[in-house]
Image: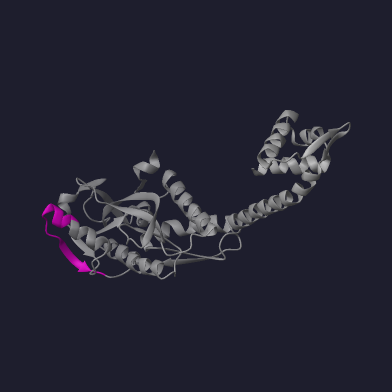
Amino acid sequence: MNSDDLELFAKVAHHRSIVRVALELGMDQSTITRHIARLEQQSGLRLFYRNGRGVVLTDAGKAFLQPARKVLESLEQARLTAHALSHAGPPRLSIAAPPTIAGVLFGRIANAVAHAFPATVLHFAESLVSNILNMLAEGEVDIGVVYAPVPASLTYDSLMLKESIYLVGPITAAPLGAEVQSTRIGEFPLLLPATPYGSRMMAETLARNLGLRLNIRLECNTGSATMKHLVEEGIGYSLMPYAIIAREISHGRLQAARLVDPPVTRDIVVVTARNRDPAPELWNTLQIVRNEIKHLVQAGRWAGVALSEDEVH
């Protein structure tokens, strides 16, 4: 038995006419007759008999109608519940990203979530990737947009991005051009964090792989705004994604060249905690985040970032 058979049975029982049901639903009478015949075969009951004005329930049909209606009511309630869950959104949603990503994404995500789920209270957290991973594990954050790799305790969304890294310098220095070979990284006095994450880890890994020695002029554990200001003042060069320097580039305050031969990139992934309940409302908001990221990249509004090959194809 299936819900289509039961629904048609209930409608024919109510109207006492296959013709009227066919007209109401825009179906062929023969199709309705086949559904009723299949239900009778599966139940082993004769449900209707014909008279001159239509069809009439048999005694077995009358007894069968009551539980059939209960099944249909339960199915309708399930549909209504699913619709409510998928359209209500979570009461509160927390999304975290490092500063280099947050500055690009948070505005778009805020608008998209507010449009889809007006009642959802949105909370943004901007922090280092290591802190975000801890917040995800502790249940303080629902969704993270972070740099890979991430621990096995987190679940990757299938969306993955490739972000190119640029050598950023003062506009008053010799022109860098559009690209700089990574093998030249040791020629530039660098401003890097002292702690082994982010651009410091990228620079040290690159130097180790190429057999180079870094020329670190200043260790600076500050936000990207201070780092950009120091570069702009001519203190040295730094390694940054293009998105966070795009405004300064357009205003002629900084210059940047993409690192090539070999290219320097890092993966950006969307993650959730494995120990969280995979509620429908969280899944729906995850799709919003995912779609906004794709739209930004495809529209060229996240400079220096490309979709993975799987997403492109």
**Depth order, front residue of 308/101:** 308
Which quadrant of the figure has residue 193? bottom left
Magenta stretch containing residue 217, yes or no? yes
- Locate residue 160, reporting x and y percent: 37, 50
Which residue is at the front of the view, 95 or 185? 95
Give above or below for 248 relative to 23.
below
Residue 110, given in percent of the width and then of the height, sits at 52, 59
Q: Is residue 66 visible?
A: yes
Across and down, in percent, residue 236 comes to: 22, 62
- Pick the quarter of the image with the C terminus: top left
Q: Residue at 26% of width from left, 61% of height from top?
A: 199
Q: Is residue 107 left or right of residue 169?
A: right
Residue farthest front in this picture = 44
Q: Quadrant of the N terminus?
A: top right
- Nearer to me, 92 or 108: 92
Region of the chain picked out in magenta, as a range? 206-220
**Does residue 186 appear in the picture of this structure?**
no
